[in-house]
Amino acid sequence: MEEFYELAQQVGAALLARQWQLATAESCTGGMVSAAVTEVAGSSAWFDRAFVTYSNEAKVGLLDVSQLTLHAHGAVSEQTVREMLAGALAHSLAHVAVAISGIAGPAGGTSEKPVGTVCFGWQRRGLAPVCITRHLDGDRSAVRKASTQIALNGILDLLVQHTR
């Protein structure tokens, strides 16, 4: 997680300055975002909790993602990520949440959602979520690392927008 240390420090400093907490809801990254932020000493002051919900059952059971949403749109969808965000905020003390769900590969892709398709979401409590879908290149490791970088940058962007 050394490659994300400086970025995670910036996220932590921005959260700490606002006295806010972060929650993560991760699927394809398997906890990489939460691992990156907890590399920073003192992160307990601004990191509340992580939900690693790799299976659909975990998404439903821990984050209240609807079975209907999963059936209609799939786990890798902005609709699912929105519900992951809502669940992370509902089941935490966090002011800000990030959610990631994607297909890291090498298998699992389809023509509609090829390997490297990753959906991201960020939300500040009380405001509408921001969700995007990206198509990332590389092997499984590269997709997961790029996803972690995008997730951390998105948290920082959300926090910077708050100061405007």
Image (spheres, rainbow, N blue to C red):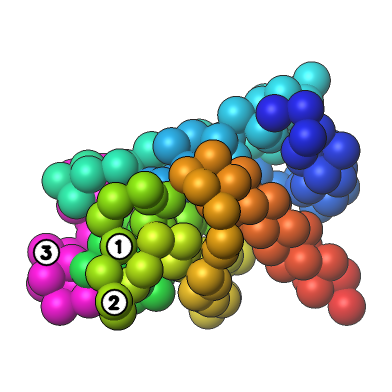
Query: Taking 87 as reference, is 10 above or below it?
Result: above
| Percent position of residue 147, x then y | 58, 53
Report helix, strand or loop for mark 2: loop
Please name the amino acid that badge 1 sits on. Answer: Gly
Report helix, strand or loop for mark 1: loop
Query: Taking 84 as reference, is 15 above or below it?
Result: above
Instruction: Tell me the crowding category of disc 2: few under 14, some 14 to 19, or many 20 or more residues within 10 angstroms, Cα based.
Output: few
Please name the amino acid that badge 2 sits on. Answer: Ser
Q: Which image quarter is the N terminus in? A: top right
User: Along the horizontal axis of the image, is 101 left or right of 17?
Assistant: left
- Disc 3: which residue: 67
The tag on residue 111 is 2
**Residue at mark 1 to residue at mark 3: CA–CA distance:** 21 Å
Asked whether residue 23 is in view, the answer is: no
Towards the viewer: 122 or 48: 122
Q: Residue furthest top?
A: 41
- Disc 1: which residue: 109
Say whether disc 1 or disc 3 marks the residue closer to the N-terminus: 3
The magenta stretch spans which residues? 59-73
User: Along the horizontal axis of the image, is 58 left or right of 96?
Assistant: left
Q: Residue at x 32, y 42 (%)?
A: 53
Instruction: Say which quarter of the image contains residue 72.
Output: bottom left
Query: Taking 157 as reference, is 31 above or below it?
Result: above
